[in-house]
Image (tube, grey):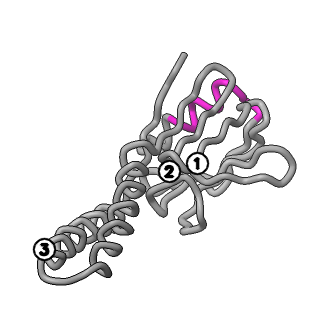
Amino acid sequence: MNRIYKSKVAKWYIWFCVCMTLAFFGSIYLCYISTWVLLFDIASMGFCLIILYDMLIHTDYTVNGEKLHIRCGFLFRMDIPISKITEITHKSTILSSPALSAKRIGLKYGKTNWVYVSPKEQGEFIETLKSINPEIKESNAPQVNGH
């Protein structure tokens, strides 16, 4: 059973990608007028754009049997046995993590390790993890329908 959950993407991330792309093309235009500094600028911005769009396209969380595979572009990959996850918490945070939105789910595994993810379908994602490991405790659950 392979189930892939794509990351939720915040609007600020999309706007940042768009602004970087516009700046990149603006730099290309200025290269026709100016010198090597702008060529270096284009090369470094191009590399940054590759990383940004790779993260945008390839940030996902795959439930494969008893494992959770977390991927964030080509920079971050992690496998966690679902049996090791002990707690799930809902948290809005900007801590560095493989997530493209500040509305995240914290997964505690082992005694003190945490990783924060932001699947689009958070409820379905949590239910899938709990169906594999019913011992997972959920804290700070969001209220549904005002209850």
Q: Please, is residue 2 above or below residue 98 in the view?
A: above
What secondary structure prevails in the magenta region?
A: helix
Between residues 43 and 16, which one lies in front from this camera angle?
43
Q: How far, Cα to Cα, is label 2 from label 3? A: 37 Å
Which badge, 2 or 3, comes first in the chain's sequence?
Answer: 3
Q: How far, Cα to Cα, is label 2 from label 1? A: 15 Å
Q: How far, Cα to Cα, is label 3 from label 1? A: 33 Å
Identify the amino acid type marked 2: Ser
Which badge, 2 or 1, comes first in the chain's sequence?
Answer: 1
Is 128 magenta? The answer is yes
User: What is the span of residues highlighted in magenta in the rendered image?
Assistant: 125-135
Between residues 74 and 61, which one lies in front from this camera angle?
74
Residue that lies at the very extreme toward the right in this rendered image: 111
Q: What residue would you read off at disc 1?
A: 76
Q: Are marks 3 and 1 in contact (CB under 8 Å)?
A: no
Is 43 magenta? The answer is no
Q: Residue at x 49, y 25 (%)?
A: 3
Q: Give the mark toward the camera: 3 or 1.
A: 3
How crowded pointer 1 is (Cα within 10 Å; few <14, some 14-19, many 20+) is rated as: few
Q: Please, is residue 97 above or below residue 32 in the view?
A: above
Q: Give the mark toward the camera: 2 or 1.
A: 1
Q: Residue at x 58, y 40 (%)?
A: 70
Q: Tag on residue 29?
A: 3
Between residues 129 and 27, which one lies in front from this camera angle?
27
Identify the amino acid type marked 1: Phe
Q: What residue would you read off at disc 2?
A: 118
Which badge, 3 or 1, comes first in the chain's sequence?
Answer: 3
